[in-house]
Image: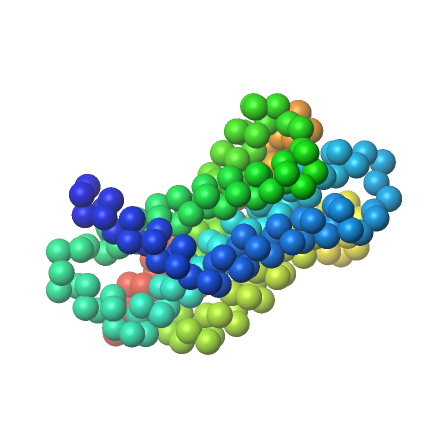
């Protein structure tokens, strides 16, 4: 347990020292939030609800990107530099290594959620109940697990530039089809049809439902759970194949 906690602390410090995380996972979502709620004059029937809705979108956008890109690319870098090979001669087991990355990244997500929620409160004075704040934060944190598993899957790639390119493409496709930039209902029907089967929409929809006084839909939970299992099985299979070579 002491080894796990120490490794988690190291992983958290490494993320906070990464300027890429600060820019893409904190700065850019807050900038987007300010632009689309204070600068761009959108014709929406309920401005207060839109401000809260888009705050959930940008928080989900931040956490999703951090899980896929920050975690995945860092794992590829460690493998390409021989760090994971070196750790096999240390007492640090593969289980602790992977769990520390997942837990450490989740703690970083807690920080991201708090900062972006705080920014939303300062920029637009978002007024939600204490239950809605806590529930939406808990949902975003828990429902990010499939994207952490996707980040681990990206981390199975052999080249850093390949992982960076692939993760960027996946991230943008998920953000667009998931309704992170604009309400899902106004997207083209084809995009909606595709997005309804991808995890990003179900990730965001859980938070969108919470701020409307509802709860995440059963389908949201089922789709995310299915993707979590698939990504975990794929990454486990690929890792075993790589170790067997």
Q: Nearer the viewer, residue 193 or 47?
A: 47
Judge whether residue 245 can be spotted in this image: yes
Residue at image coords 25%, 66%: 84
Q: Looking at the picture, does residue 97 appear above or below residue 220?
A: below
Quadrant holding the C terminus: bottom left
| Display coloring | rainbow
**Residue 198's spot in the image, x, y percent?**
60, 51
Q: Nearer the viewer, residue 35 or 173?
A: 35
Residue at image coords 60%, 42%: 119
Residue at image coords 67%, 28%: 127
| Residue 149 placement, left or right of 92 | right
The total of numbered circles placed on residues is 0
Quadrant holding the N terminus: top left
**Residue 153's spot in the image, x, y percent?**
42, 60
Q: Residue 15: which quarter of the image?
A: bottom left
Q: Looking at the picture, does residue 204 appear above or below residue 150?
A: above
**Residue 207's spot in the image, x, y percent?**
61, 36
Q: Looking at the picture, does residue 85 appear above or below residue 227?
A: below
Q: Nearer the viewer, residue 240 or 68?
A: 68
Residue at image coords 53%, 43%: 115
Q: Residue furthest front?
A: 122
| Residue 33 placement, left or right of 66 | right
**Residue 143's spot in the image, x, y percent?**
50, 41
Judge whether residue 219 can be spotted in this image: no
| Residue 130 placement, left or right of 150 | right
């Amino acid at each position: 347990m002491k080894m796990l906690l120490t490794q988690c602390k190291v992983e958290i410090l490494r993320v906070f020292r990464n300027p890429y995380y600060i820019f893409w996972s904190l700065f850019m979502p807050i900038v987007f939030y300010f632009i689309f709620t204070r600068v761009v004059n959108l014709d929406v029937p309920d401005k207060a609800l839109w401000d809260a809705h888009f705050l959930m979108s940008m928080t989900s956008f931040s956490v999703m990107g951090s899980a896929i890109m920050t975690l995945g690319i860092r794992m590829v870098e460690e493998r390409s530099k021989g760090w994971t090979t070196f750790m096999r001669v240390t007492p640090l087991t593969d289980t602790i290594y992977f769990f520390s990355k997942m837990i450490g990244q989740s703690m970083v997500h807690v920080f991201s959620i708090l900062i972006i929620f705080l920014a939303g409160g300062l920029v637009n004075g978002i007024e939600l109940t204490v239950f809605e704040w806590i529930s939406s934060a808990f949902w975003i944190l828990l429902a990010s697990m499939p994207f952490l598993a996707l980040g681990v899957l990206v981390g199975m790639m052999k080249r850093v530039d390949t992982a960076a390119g692939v993760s960027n493409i996946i991230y943008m496709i998920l953000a667009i089809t998931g309704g992170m930039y604009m309400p899902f209902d106004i997207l083209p029907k084809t995009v909606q049809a595709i997005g309804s089967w991808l995890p990003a929409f179900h990730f965001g929809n859980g938070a969108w439902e919470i701020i409307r006084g509802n709860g995440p839909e059963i389908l949201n939970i089922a789709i995310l759970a299915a993707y979590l299992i698939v990504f975990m099985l794929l990454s486990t299979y690929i890792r075993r194949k790589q170790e067997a070579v």
